[in-house]
Amino acid sequence: MTKTSRSGCPINLTLEMIGDNWSLIVVRDIMFGGRRHYRDLLNKSEEGIASNILADRLNKLVDAGLLTKTNDPAHKQKSIYSLTEPAIQLVPMLAIMGAWGTRHTPASRELSVRAKLLDEGGPSTWSIFMDELRHIHLGATQPERSIIQELTTAYEAAMAK
């Protein structure tokens, strides 16, 4: 617990780290949207995040150890943001939040399709998805099944309707 924490309660400490209006949205966009550059995160945000807020949240998430920032070898002026293991371990929480949101909020059909697939797949699907994220962001072995491809295909089909 740091001196600025309200308490040592793990729920409180988690909320202090990721409980603002934007941090989980940024993690979601990297995790589910494959957005790893600042410009992609800014321009493709469904919620319309402001550039100063995005820059602040990216710095905060890097400082908290949820993201890493490396130079993009393909473009000297760009950085690549990657999920760390603690961020990847947010998958079950985000899956549960998405499932709750599809049941208890007026979420759109198109933006709910991925949450529904993760809910239906349950922990075994979350585990494969986490392994796939470890492959993409941490260089681990690629799993045989691609949850990202399944989620993308379902989302694109829902958007086409």
Image: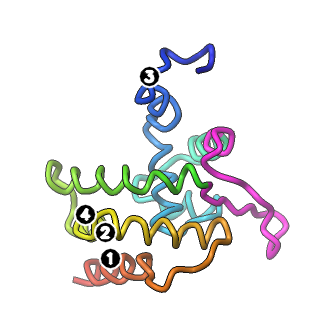
Q: Earlier in the sequence, mark 1 or mark 4?
A: 4
Q: Which mark is residue 9?
A: 3
Measured from the top left, where is residue 51 in percent x and y? 59, 48
> Would you identify the image quadrant in which residue 40 lies?
bottom right
Q: Nearer the viewer, residue 50 or 103?
A: 103
Q: Which residues are magenta?
A: 60-84
Task: From the viewer's perspective, tell me whether residue 102 is left or right of residue 1.
Answer: left
Task: From the viewer's perspective, tell me whether residue 41 is left or right of residue 107.
Answer: right
Q: Amino acid at mark 4?
A: Asp
Q: Quadrant of the N terminus?
A: top right
Q: Which residue is mark 1?
A: 155
Q: Which of the two marks, 1 or 3, is nearer to us in this view?
A: 3
Graded by Cα atoms within 10 Å as few (under 14), some (14 to 19) or many (20 or more), the crowding at tag 2 reads many
Q: Are marks 2 and 1 in contact (CB under 8 Å)?
A: yes
Measured from the top left, where is residue 13 in percent x and y? 49, 27
Name the secondary structure under disc 2.
helix
Name the secondary structure under disc 1.
helix
Q: Is residue 151 above or below residue 57?
A: below
Q: Amino acid at mark 1?
A: Tyr
Q: Which residue is mark 2?
A: 114
Q: Residues under labels 4 and 3: Cα distance?
A: 28 Å
Q: Which of the two marks, 2 or 1, is nearer to us in this view?
A: 2
Q: Amino acid at mark 3?
A: Cys
Q: Which residue is mark 4?
A: 119
Q: Residue at x 30, y 50 (%)?
A: 97
